[in-house]
Amino acid sequence: MNAVFADTSAWLAAQNPRLEDHEATLGQLAAFEKDGIRIITTGFVVAEMHAMLLRRQGPAAALEFLDGVDADPSCDVVDVDGELVSAATDRWLRVFRDQAFSLCDAVSFEVMRREGIREAFTLDHHFAVAGFTMLPAPRPPPRRRR
């Protein structure tokens, strides 16, 4: 693995110490850095993350995230254009019409397909449904007591 796709869900957990997956996502980011793994994402994911941070933590945190992505030489942000949206809609939203994939998800999947990326830094199970490997590995569901 020389590149991984970064999704909003994992980045959000890494940013927020109150979230259950915070430590796992921080550990995964540290492993990527140690191993020289490139992080690929899209402008849609960056915009979604900015909006979430803006609502949850305020303008300073949202701007700090944007500055961090911009300054990180190991992170590449793929521009989203009409052709990419059309391809994502046809290949993912139409084919998986029984799934609640967002357009942001579908564009992410299409970028991963085009770039030959199999692993996603995500907590969103839709990536597994679409056939990709989730990092960090999803936690097993809690055992039910009888």
Image (cartoon, rainbow, N blue to C red):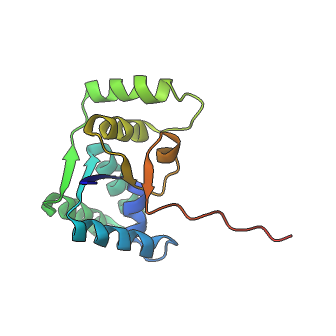
Residue 28: % across, % down: 36, 68
Residue 83: % across, % down: 27, 24
Residue 86: % across, % down: 34, 23
Compared to residue 106, the image places residue 67 above or below, namely below
Question: Which residue occupies the foreground of this view, 38 or 62?
Answer: 38
For this view, does 137 lie left or right of residue 109? right
Q: Spot the residue most to the right.
A: 146
Which residue is rendered at x = 24% and y = 63% of the image? 63
Which residue is rendered at x = 13% and y = 62% of the image? 71
Which residue is rendered at x = 40% and y = 68% of the image? 25
Which residue is rendered at x = 43% and y = 67% of the image? 13
For this view, does 140 lie left or right of residue 30? right
Residue 73, quarter of the rendered image = bottom left
Residue 140, quarter of the rendered image = bottom right
Quadrant in which the C terminus appears: bottom right
For this view, does 4 lie left or right of residue 36? right
Compared to residue 137, the image places residue 127 above or below, namely above
Quadrant in which the N terminus appears: bottom left
Question: Which residue occupies the foreground of this view, 60 or 16?
Answer: 16
Q: Spot the residue most to the front.
A: 1
Question: Which residue occupies the foreground of this view, 31 or 58?
Answer: 31
* Number of marks in the rendered image: 0
Residue 87, quarter of the rendered image = top left
Residue 125: % across, % down: 53, 50
